[in-house]
Amino acid sequence: MLAVHGLSKWYGEHLALDEATFDAHPGRIVGFLGPNGAGKTTTMRCILGLVKPDAGTVTWEGAPVTTQRRLQFGYMPEERGLYPKMRIADQLTYFGRLSGMPSSQASAAAAAWLERLGLADRARSTVEQLSHGNKQRVQLAASLVHNPRLAVLDEPFSGLDPIGTDALAAELRTLAADGTTILFSSHQLDLVEDVCQDVVIINRGRVVRTGTLDDLRAQSAVRRLSVEVDGRQWRPTRVPTTEPSPAVDVGMGRSHVLLAADVSVDDVLAEARESGSITAFNFDPPSLSDIFREAVAS
Amino acid sequence: MTGWRQVALVARRDFVQRATSRPFLATLVLVVGLVLVGGPLLVDVTTPDPARDVGVVAPVDEGLEGAVVVAAEQVDLEASVTEVADRSAGEVALTEGDLDVLIVLEPAPGVLVWQSTPDTRLATAVVQALRSTAQAQQAAELSLSPAQTTALLSPPLPGEDILEPVDPEEGADRAASFVGMLLLYFAVVLFGQFVMLGVVEEKSSRVVEVVLSRVVPYRLLAGKVIGIGALGVVQILAFAVAIYASARLSGAADDVTLDPGLVASILGWFLIGFAFFAVVYAALGATVTRQEDVQSVALLPLVVVLPAYFIAIFGADDPDSVLVRVTSILPPFSPFIMPIRAAATDVPGWEVAVSVVLLLAATYGVIRLAGRIYSGAILSVGRRVSLRDAWRGSTHVPTE
């Protein structure tokens, strides 16, 4: 288990991390969410030892993370980068060996990853000869070639087309099924909702929500209401509502409003009946986007 | 997995990737080829041909021919004497380049005929030969005994006592030390910058974060310095061997013998001196992100290297001056100046020992210092990081 406890980091006058605390468990895919500048990358860099925190600890399986133990981690930084003029098979082998694999094992792992990503015939190509999508694939392989037990992936889905996104999501599920702990950040909340089981939301350096997706939904103070009366959009007037932003409001051609979780569904239903014949009525737990907005706003 | 294995992996990658790149191989082959082919050619062109053709209008006195050859040898010339029928035939041969000088003995006292500018060495030899032949004839006419002739013509000369004889190998020692100093200078200026560019490339391609998630900064730094530095040393040694081979091939170094101990000490100074500056360049490289900022930083080490270079050049003539004595002990000037001073004069053993110890200590210090600056600056992007910020931002937590 990865345990991040009380992590704080100052950059000059700016507090980038403010006692951030959360856990990530084996075999679980953890979505690490937060607005830009919330402290996601700094947290990941602290886990990887790239940034020294001013306070707090990172432990792995109950013990502090040493240089040696850190070799069990795989990291994909947000700033992508590989050696442009090095052959991709050589490059993956090199990263495998740097993580402690013997030479033969590293080259076998590199070949296996290239096969898995459909790049076996490009093994002798240099990185600069690859397309953007293929570079992304090799980047992922570079962080996972040594079969890490913890994968820390900073924005792994950014820049991928829908097919690439599906393929990466499938890879993450396979890794988690093998027992790997996965912590990844993303701004694509629909995607995170599909892929991850656990969520950590960070805002202004503080962890504001952490838990399983189901728990967070249940604990949320809002519910999502979507009603059609006589085939037209309808919204209640007697209970307080939150206006959702139009950008996320286009799903299924039906608008929704957010209500407090303790609102009586019967009261809303009664008001709707007074307006006409109800053709659709949904009263759901909030989406991850709703939870995110709620967490970041509070 | 030991840290040294990671250092070796980083060094190997940097060495192999560069050594197998086309620009590197092309440069190496071109320069070594030029030295091997061009060196002997240059020696051939610039070394004057000692052969001289001397024409004598018939009849040739046998004694004169021998005397010309002997006198020419004394001025390092190889004369061959040819008989010509008369002066006009001799002048034709001079014009066509078959003769270098024409000796016309009749009417006495005779004349030396040249095509244009007289060759002073050849003239000296010929005049000497004519004089000794004439003296021998006079002696014969006076009926002097061979002993009397010798006493008259070759009186015994005083011997020589030299109070401070010059070591015949000193010239070679000085030249070798000077070449070693020049090689160090070029290695620092050229390959030191290669180390820096290697660091900047890794930063600008952003791969450094992937590497640093596996390797702590000072090990990456050490690996890069060793890998790129070793490549620089290999290249410099290839050039040095090519220059030596070229000198042997052309015969220019036939009289030169090098003391293996001296070569080893020059190599030792070169390696420590280069290591010191390569580490400095790597740390400076970590503070820049963009290639265009490289030049401004690359000039910083020259503040030390250029004075060291000039003190070494002028110090060869005045090895006992205070400036040379102090800078030959003080790092980082010492690797430039001590070998030059040691070749020019006797340096007490303890001064050499102190100098080596100080340089090793300074190199260790700069590795630690550079490791910290490197780790504080390597992940920065955008503007240049000041050395102070890099020092403060150091991430390295020794958690072995």
Image (spheres, grey):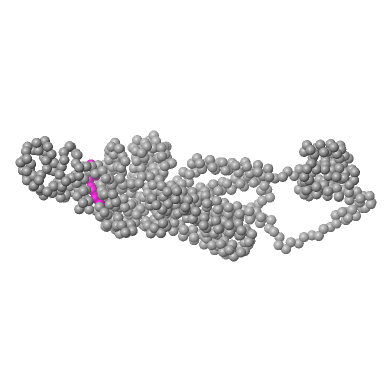
The percent position of residue A288, horizontal first and vertical second, equals 21, 45
Q: Is residue B310 magenta?
A: no
> How many tags in the picture?
0
Residue located 55% across and 56% down the image:
B306
Depicted A157 relative to depicted A43: above or below: above
Foreground pick, B44 / B246 = B44
Residue located 77% across and 60% down the image:
B160
Q: In this picture, which residue range is highlighted in magenta?
A: A194-202
The percent position of residue A53, horizontal first and vertical second, equals 32, 57
> In this view of the protein, can residue B225 be seen by the observer?
no
Q: Is residue A230 left or right of residue A1?
A: left
Q: Is residue A151 left or right of residue B307?
A: left
Depicted A192 relative to depicted B361: above or below: above
Q: Is residue A240 left or right of residue B5?
A: left
Q: Is residue A180 left or right of residue B6?
A: left
Residue located 27% across and 54% down the image:
A205
Outermost residue, top side = A121
The percent position of residue A93, horizontal first and vertical second, equals 40, 43
Asked which quadrant contains residue A206, the reply is: bottom left
Asked which quadrant contains residue B321, the reply is: bottom right
The percent position of residue B302, horizontal first and vertical second, equals 52, 55
Residue located 29% across and 36% down the image:
A163
Foreground pick, B88 / A159 = B88
Q: Is residue A197 magenta?
A: yes
> In this view of the protein, can residue A231 be seen by the observer?
yes
